[in-house]
Each structure stands twice: as structure tokens, then as C-alpha cells.
Image (cartoon, rainbow, N blue to C red):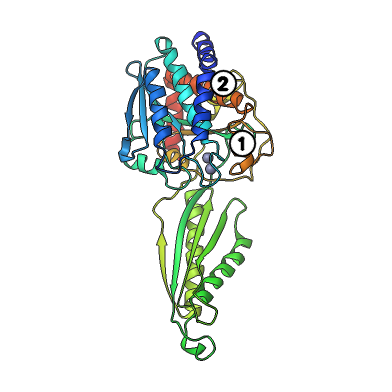
């Protein structure tokens, strides 16, 4: 085992320049959700050149891909890549690093194919994490149905094997009232904006009773046409987040109740639209965390200070609800650099990101070997997952 693990480390280092160069190339050509044509193409070419069988456009998603490396009958381990950018600020979430840590892990495993235990390595390209829910579409079309466990890393300002990810459900409210002159005949009007504002007030009061790991945030998307008209229409969009599906949906129900009560108070009607793409919370799997933890030092990593109150959401959470999943954070930027900032975008392609990029690749490749080699461990991981 140690020989194949040493070989993985050496292969990753040997591929280091190529992995880093492609990471920089993706970073320099930021593409938004479902438009990641170039990144998808480059990743497919890279993995194809390393011996993977590559399928582009899996699950009916043009910029998704699945690359397969097979060494005989055995378990199926999925390594996930993301490669979408953010509007306006490019790769401020560092998905170029996710892409190349994943593809790099695959390439390192392909380089030692002859020494790998029997099984199947899938590198799955998952578009549109930043709104769009690419992984949800891939799950629904069966891309994860034969996967025994899934792994992904995400760049961060520190290395953490686990950080909770909240589920997030989006809901839109549209209130419809009746327009009237706001001075001549205000009593003829029914004010939709009043209902909208009262919803925000009710939600603000609800916050006091909320658990600290829940979040509600909203925006008034339409508030009326002019001050001298009683507003016949108002629209607001809310995100409701919680650490479990139960917590998220029960809070969601409370927010809907706020909007309904506000509609009744203003004597206007309400249309509630639930958005279909729900990012589900990350389900933690201790067996996978232990496997990654045992390979941390070998990959050249050490965990940083915990940051339990910094809670985001991702469609990797949906994957974790259908198969055992790990989503580790790898330090690629100076401590204190927040994601979705221009500073993080710069860090994701700076020389300082190289160590984390290659270590992330090693961590996943080393752990994949452990999982292929130890059916008992994998069975325990799946039993833990089945316990819910
Ligand atoms: Zn992001
Ligand atoms: Zn991200």
C-alpha cells in the first residue's frame, strides 16, 4: 500500500506544472453556470490524454462529463469537479482549483493504474454550482446511481475536513392588490407593498426565535411603480437555510406563514412560488472523514482553526443525501480571505494556491486507493450512510 501511495504522491508532483497551468487557464477564462464549454472541453481532453474513457454531456447537461478509469470489478469511487465562475468577479470561489484537484487526482490514479486495487474511478464534471444546481440534474438523471461514495475539495482560507453546509430553499412571493391614486382615493386601493414590507417585518421578528445555524435573507424584487399610486403589485424573493432538511422546511413554512398573514392584513392576494432547485444540507460521514483524516499528513496538509459559524450552501449537499460524500476545504489563500471576493479570485490563481491544489489532488487520490483496497471500510461507510 505504501508503494502505491508514494507513487501517487510522485505522480501528482510530476504532473504539477500541467495541473497548475490548466487551473490558471480555467481561471483566466471564467464561464458562468451551464456555459462552461471551454473548461469542460479542457478537462475532458486532459483526462482523455491520461487514459480515461470520457463522456461529455452526461445526464442531459451539455457541460457535464464523466471520465472513467476501470481496473476490474469492484467499488465505484466518484471524484467531483466544479468549474463555473461568478458573474462579475470571475473565479472568486476558486472552482478552477476544484476542477484541477479533481482532474489531477484522476490523473495521478491513472498514472499508477497497474498498482490500483480493482474498481472504478469516476471523475464527474458537475456544472453550475453557483445557482443552477448542476448536481441536482445529474442526480435526477441517474449519474450517481452506481456510485459507492463521492468526494470533492473546495478551496478556502484554511484546511478543514468538514464544515457544515446548510440546505437552502428559495421561495418567491407575489402580492396582488388594487391600484388607486394615493392622494385622491387611497381608500379604493389595496396595497401590495404593505404586505411585502409586513412580511419582512414579520420575518425580522421570527429571527429572534431562530436557531443560530439557520438563515433567512430576502430582497424586494419589485416594490411598485410610483409613490403616488397605491401599489397593486409587489414581489419578494427569500432564501431559507437550515442545517437539516427538517429544520429548513419547518422554517420555510414559518416564512410562508409570514407572507400569508401579511397578505391578509393588507387585503391583497398572494402567490407563492417554490423554486425547484433546492440545495440540500451536507450529510456528514464519519467513516469518510476518518479515511481523509488518515491521509492528511501524507498529502502535506494540516487542519486549520475551526470556523463553525461560517455556513454556506452547495449542491454537493444533494449528492451527500444520495451517496456517502465528503466535501473537504483546502487552504489555498491566506487566513482571513473570504470566498466570493476579488481577493479570493486573485488568490485562486496565485503561486500560493499551488500547494493546496496539488495537496487536494493527493488527498483524494490517496483516499480513493484506501477505499478501493478496503471493502470492509467501504461497507461501514455505506452502513453509516444508511443509518440516517
Ligand atoms: Zn461559491
Ligand atoms: Zn464554490
Estimate the x, y position of residue 340 in percent, counting from the top left: 58, 44
- Circle number at residue 26: none
Per the image, the residue denoted by label 1 is 346
Label 2 CA crowd tier, 10 Å (few <14, some 14–19, many 20+): some
Q: Of discs 2 and 1, which sits in the foreground?
A: 1
Estimate the x, y position of residue 50 in percent, counting from the top left: 40, 17
Work out which quarter of the rendered image holds the C terminus and state it: top left
Out of 215 and 49, give the one closest to the viewer: 49
In the displayed structure, 14 sits above or below 330; it is above
Q: Residue at x 59, y 69 (%)?
A: 201
Could you tell me which secondary element the residue under label 1 belongs to? Answer: helix
Q: Give the mark count.
A: 2
Q: Is residue 163 visible?
A: yes
Image-quadrant location for residue 94: top right
Q: Are marks 2 and 1 in contact (CB under 8 Å)?
A: no
Estimate the x, y position of residue 169 in percent, counting from the top left: 47, 54
Using the numbered discs, state the Cα–Cα distance from disc 2 to disc 1 in whole angstroms: 28 Å
Q: Is residue 308 left or right of residue 198?
A: right
Image-quadrant location for residue 358: top right
Per the image, the residue denoted by label 2 is 295
Estimate the x, y position of residue 9 in percent, counting from the top left: 54, 15
In the displayed structure, 250 sits above or below 205; it is above
Q: Earlier in the sequence, mark 2 or mark 1?
A: 2
Badge 1 residue CB within 8 Å of ligand 1: no
Residue at the top extreme, as displayed: 3
Could you tell me which secondary element the residue under label 2 belongs to? Answer: helix
Out of 152 and 54, give the one closest to the viewer: 54
Label 1 CA crowd tier, 10 Å (few <14, some 14–19, many 20+): some
Q: Residue at x 58, y 25 (%)?
A: 293
Amino acid at each position: 500500500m505504501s508503494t502505491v501511495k508514494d507513487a501517487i504522491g510522485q505522480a501528482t508532483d510530476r504532473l504539477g506544472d500541467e495541473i497548475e497551468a490548466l487551473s490558471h487557464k480555467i481561471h483566466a477564462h471564467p464561464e458562468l453556470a451551464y456555459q462552461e464549454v471551454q473548461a469542460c472541453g479542457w478537462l475532458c481532453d486532459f483526462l482523455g490524454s491520461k487514459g480515461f474513457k470520457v463522456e461529455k454531456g452526461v445526464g442531459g447537461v451539455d457541460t457535464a462529463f464523466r471520465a472513467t478509469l476501470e481496473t476490474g470489478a469492484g467499488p465505484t469511487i466518484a471524484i467531483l469537479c466544479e468549474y463555473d465562475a461568478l458573474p462579475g468577479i470571475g473565479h472568486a470561489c476558486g472552482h478552477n482549483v476544484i476542477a484541477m484537484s479533481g482532474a489531477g487526482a484522476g490523473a495521478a490514479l491513472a498514472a499508477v493504474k497497474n498498482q490500483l486495487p480493482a474498481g472504478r474511478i469516476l471523475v464527474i464534471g458537475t456544472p453550475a454550482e453557483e445557482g443552477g444546481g448542476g448536481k441536482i440534474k445529474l442526480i435526477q438523471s441517474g449519474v450517481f446511481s452506481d456510485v459507492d461514495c463521492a468526494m470533492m475539495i473546495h478551496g478556502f482560507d484554511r484546511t478543514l475536513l468538514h464544515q457544515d453546509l446548510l440546505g437552502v430553499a428559495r421561495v418567491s412571493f407575489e402580492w396582488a392588490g388594487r391600484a388607486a391614486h394615493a392622494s385622491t382615493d387611497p381608500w379604493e386601493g389595496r396595497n401590495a407593498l404593505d404586505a411585502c414590507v409586513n412580511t419582512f417585518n414579520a420575518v425580522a421578528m421570527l429571527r429572534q426565535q431562530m436557531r443560530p445555524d439557520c438563515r433567512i435573507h430576502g430582497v424586494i424584487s419589485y416594490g411598485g411603480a410610483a409613490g403616488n399610486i397605491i401599489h397593486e403589485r409587489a414581489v419578494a424573493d427569500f432564501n431559507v437555510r437550515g442545517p437539516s432538511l427538517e429544520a429548513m422546511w419547518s422554517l420555510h413554512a414559518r416564512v410562508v406563514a409570514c407572507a400569508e398573514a401579511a397578505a391578509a392584513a393588507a387585503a391583497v392576494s398572494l402567490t407563492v412560488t417554490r423554486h425547484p432547485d433546492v440545495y440540500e444540507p451536507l450529510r456528514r460521514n464519519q467513516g469518510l472523514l476518518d479515511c481523509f483524516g488518515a491521509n492528511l499528513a501524507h498529502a502535506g496538509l494540516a487542519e486549520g482553526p475551526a470556523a463553525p459559524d461560517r455556513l454556506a450552501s452547495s449542491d454537493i449537499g444533494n449528492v451527500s443525501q444520495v451517496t456517502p460524500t465528503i466535501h473537504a476545504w483546502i487552504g489555498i489563500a491566506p487566513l482571513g480571505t473570504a470566498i466570493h471576493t476579488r481577493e479570493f479570485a486573485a488568490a485562486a490563481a496565485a503561486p500560493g494556491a499551488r500547494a493546496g491544489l496539488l495537496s487536494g489532488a493527493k488527498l483524494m487520490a490517496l483516499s480513493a486507493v484506501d477505499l478501493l483496497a478496503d471493502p470492509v471500510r467501504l461497507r461501514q461507510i455505506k452502513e453509516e450512510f444508511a443509518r440516517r
